[in-house]
Image (spheres, rainbow, N blue to C red):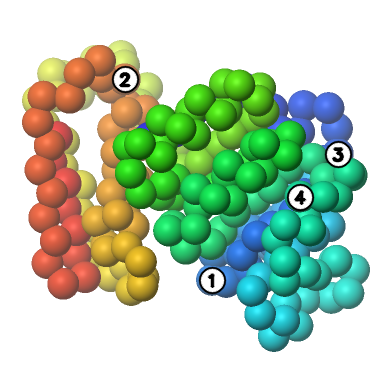
Amino acid sequence: MAVCSEESDAIFHNGMKTLALIGVGKWGKNIVSTLERLPEARLRYLCARKKESLAPYPDTYEKLTDWHKILERTDLDAVLIATPPSTHYEFIESALKAGKDVFVEKPMVLSLREAEQIQELVLESGRVFMVGYEYLFNDHINYLKKEIENGSLGKILEVRHEHVLSPSRPDVDIFWDEAPHPLSIFLHFFNPQKLISAEGDIQHDTASSDL
């Protein structure tokens, strides 16, 4: 589930933005690498719990271990969150209340109640909020969407997704970790008004879903 108060590229609609990244682990490193190639983005702040996690990064970044201090920065436009899913809600809530745009990796949060609260906060704040569903920007996915919309594939009755070899995470299982991707793709393809049925299965390091 995701809500966004503007188009996905709105975070850069007014030129260069100053950004902070909370979490520099496996996926956080990818975000740093990507932002270094975007001229519209100025990644200035990096935050991690341990100083040693920040050590590999050059001193051109301001490196902090207290994320509260990042939100106090008056030049900060947006916060990017790449931390364990169980920490997402607190970071999202605090950043929105501090008047910052927010990008968060999936899964957004771990309960419907938290998702609904985030939705209310986004609407109240008027800030840009986006979840990292990168497959929605994949050329192959968008080609399939066009083919579905023009009827080339006929009437689709069921869709199935399977993901294998997901990394182990301490706070969520493989279904929480990977199901957001196919679900976001299915929503992108079909824009359903009602979910009739959905099933999921987990077997060791493999997850599958049927809608």
- Determine which residue is flagged by label 1: 26
- Secondary structure under the numbered disc 2 in the rendered image: loop
In the rendered image of this protein, does residue 113 appear above or below residue 63?
above
Instruction: Classify 10 Å Cα crowding around label 1: few (below 14), some (14-19), many (20 and above).
Output: few
| Location of residue 13 in the rendering, given as x and y in whole percent from the top left corner | 77, 27
In the picture, the disc for residue 191 is: 2
Would you say residue 10 is visible in this rendering? yes
Residue drawn at x 28%, y 32% is: 186
Earlier along the polypeptide chain: callout 4 or callout 2?
4
**What is the distance, in whole Å, between disc 3 and disc 1 at their CAs?**
26 Å
| Location of residue 143 in the rendering, given as x and y in whole percent from the top left corner | 40, 31
The residue type indicated by label 3 comes to Met
- Secondary structure under the numbered disc 3 in the rendered image: loop
- Determine which residue is flagged by label 3: 16
Would you say residue 141 is visible in this rendering? no
In the rendered image of this protein, does residue 145 appear above or below residue 33?
above
**What is the distance, in whole Å, between disc 3 and disc 4 at their CAs?**
18 Å
In the rendered image of this protein, does residue 36 appear above or below residue 135?
below
In the picture, the disc for residue 110 is: none
- Determine which residue is flagged by label 4: 71
Asked which quadrant contains residue 147, the reply is top left
Residue drawn at x 57%, y 71% is: 25
**What is the distance, in whole Å, between disc 1 and disc 4 at their CAs?**
23 Å
**What is the distance, in whole Å, between disc 2 and disc 1 at their CAs?**
32 Å
- Secondary structure under the numbered disc 1 in the rendered image: helix
| Location of residue 116 in the rendering, given as x and y in whole percent from the top left corner | 41, 30
Instruction: Classify 10 Å Cα crowding around label 2: few (below 14), some (14-19), many (20 and above).
Output: few
Asked if marks 3 and 2 touch (Cβ < 8 Å), the reply is no
The residue type indicated by label 4 comes to Leu
In this view, the mark in front (4 or 2): 4
The residue type indicated by label 1 comes to Lys
Decide if residue 31 is on the left or right side of residue 164. right
